[in-house]
Amino acid sequence: MTIKIHRILKSDLSNAGTIDVHASGMSNTSGMTISHFAFAPQQTEATIPYSLEIVSEHVPKISQTDYCIVIRKKIDLTAVSVNEKTIEDIGKDIGEYDYTDNVPARPLDLPPGFTELYKG
Amino acid sequence: MNITQHFDFDRGLAVISPQGLQKYTERLDSYSQILTQLYVSSANNINKYCIDSCWESGNIYYVSYDNGYVKKIQFDGTEIASLSLVNPLMVSVIQYSTGMSVTVNFPPQNDQGCWIADKGSGKIIKTDNNLNIMAELEGIDNPVALIADIDGGCYVVEEHTFPSVGGNLIKVSSDAEVLGVKPYSSFSPSVVKFIDIAVDSAGWVWFCADDKLFNLTYSSGQLHQQYVLNPLGSDDPFSSSSSEPFIEETKHIGSIDTDRNNLSRHLYVAGGNGSEAFILKYNPESGSLLARKQYYDISFPYIVKVVQGMGSDSLYILEDSAKWDDYGYGSSSSSSSSSSTEWKSSSSSSSKSSSTSESSSSSSSL
């Protein structure tokens, strides 16, 4: 059956759209409920002033430059913060991935904004 | 590297059913399903509160009655925490704020936990944000509703059918202690069948029963009834004097919800019958009707959920034509009475039982 969920505007209670939920084998909405959630990020165009080429167990390239760091473990490269706010604390830019604060000696400086991370 | 995620609160919707959890987002001019996973519940489980989301973090809590667990997941489906119980029936997230913020932290793991009604063990349970049990209250045998309050506590509604008929609205503290009890018989007029409950950003309670809306506040161990609205009776906005015609056939209230993000704390009421629906919008301070709408292409609105995002402009309703008489309206006129249940609370900081019964209430009808 198809179950309908309607989006109603708060202002005048008019119907702003309908979602058809296709639920096979159901004869009614028993056991069904709904909740909104904070998702659906709006995409914003942005330019990162360097390129990344990172392959597990290989030397990463940042803007065509080889860096003598071997990625030994999975690293979460996602970074989310308030717009225009500089991420300064180590770890805040990796989504609390299971990391350590042990930073090995590195032969070359990383580009501004990067912090070297090491998973032993 | 700075990346910002903006959230459009009106475009995220989670639907949970025996077939699974489905999340929808609106992209351009159409909705598209982005995830189906996880959830298998009892087809006979008809409660409205088996999923709830944190406005601040975006985390989703949901329960599986038959499989006996509560899970907390990120919005991308990643499981954060799980708690095994006997037969969890309802969950209500303890919200940080009165409404969702524009931005959320990532990963979104910071919230205040939730309240859970575990029907199998007769308990309501408060957890932290990792689903560790922080406090629990025993003796809640037949919970029909559970909703977190703005003070970290909660309200629970329990009903009894044997040997006594009736129920109680119970105010519970953040330490799972009973602070106040209002039996169905103490409402004015007394109530028989519960429908729905909502708590607004001022802590006012909206208790919907017998197609009436009771406005309550809690103070000093008492739940005070301020006024009652009767939108299908004396306060019917679709009466014959209305400019909008209304087909006169039996109709009932299906669900209520409040706008916690709006300073005016508007109350939304949805109801109807098997072939039509109505939606009402009230000012809670005065009880005055602000807007009304009838739909002849929407059947009984079983659930209404107001989107709590800052600047959000919408609410969702779930329709089901088969639900409009599920409550057996008109089939029972038995008087309600309070039960002799003993509640026993325990928490990490205190462990004592208490109960307070309210023998009378202040009331006035509009």
Image: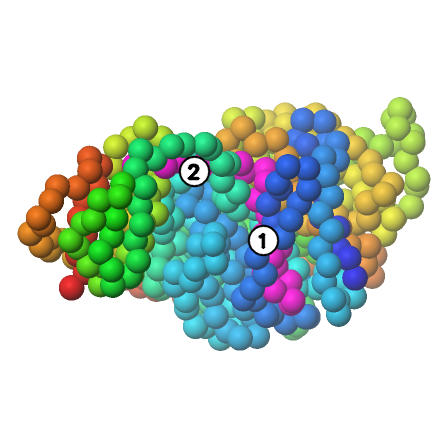
How packed mark 1 is, by other alpha carbons closer than 10 Å (few <14, some 14-19, many 20 or more), is few
Q: Does residue B209 belong to the magenta stretch?
A: no
How packed mark 2 is, by other alpha carbons closer than 10 Å (few <14, some 14-19, many 20 or more), is many
Q: Secondary structure at mark 1?
A: strand
Of the residues shown, which amino acid type is indicated by label 1? Ile
Q: Is residue B173 above or below residue A31?
A: above
Of the residues shown, which amino acid type is indicated by label 2? Gln
Viewer-proximal residue, B203 or A22?
A: A22
Q: Would you identify the image quadrant in which residue A57 lies? A: bottom left
Residue that label 1 marks: B34
Q: Does the rendering let one see residue B265?
A: yes
Q: Position of residue A77 (x, y in %)?
A: 31, 49
Quadrant position of the N terminus of chain B in the picture: top left
Residue located 92% across and 31% down the image: B245
Viewer-proximal residue, B270 or B208?
A: B270
Q: Position of residue A1 (x, y in %)?
A: 79, 62
* Distance in Å between CA atoms under marks 2 and 1: 18 Å
Label 2: chain? B
Q: How is the image coloured?
A: rainbow
Viewer-proximal residue, B59 or A111?
A: A111
Name the side, left or right, on which B278 lies relative to B223. Answer: right
User: Residue B5's mark?
Assistant: 2
Q: Secondary structure at mark 2?
A: loop
Name the side, left or right, on which B135 lies relative to A6. Answer: left
Viewer-proximal residue, B32 or B163?
A: B32
Residue located 36% across and 37% down the image: B3
Q: Is residue B129 above or below residue B88?
A: above
Name the side, left or right, on which B254 lies relative to A110. Answer: right
Quadrant position of the C terminus of chain B in the picture: top right
Q: Which residues are magenta?
A: B1-22
Earlier-in-chain disc, 2 versus 1: 2
Label 1: chain? B
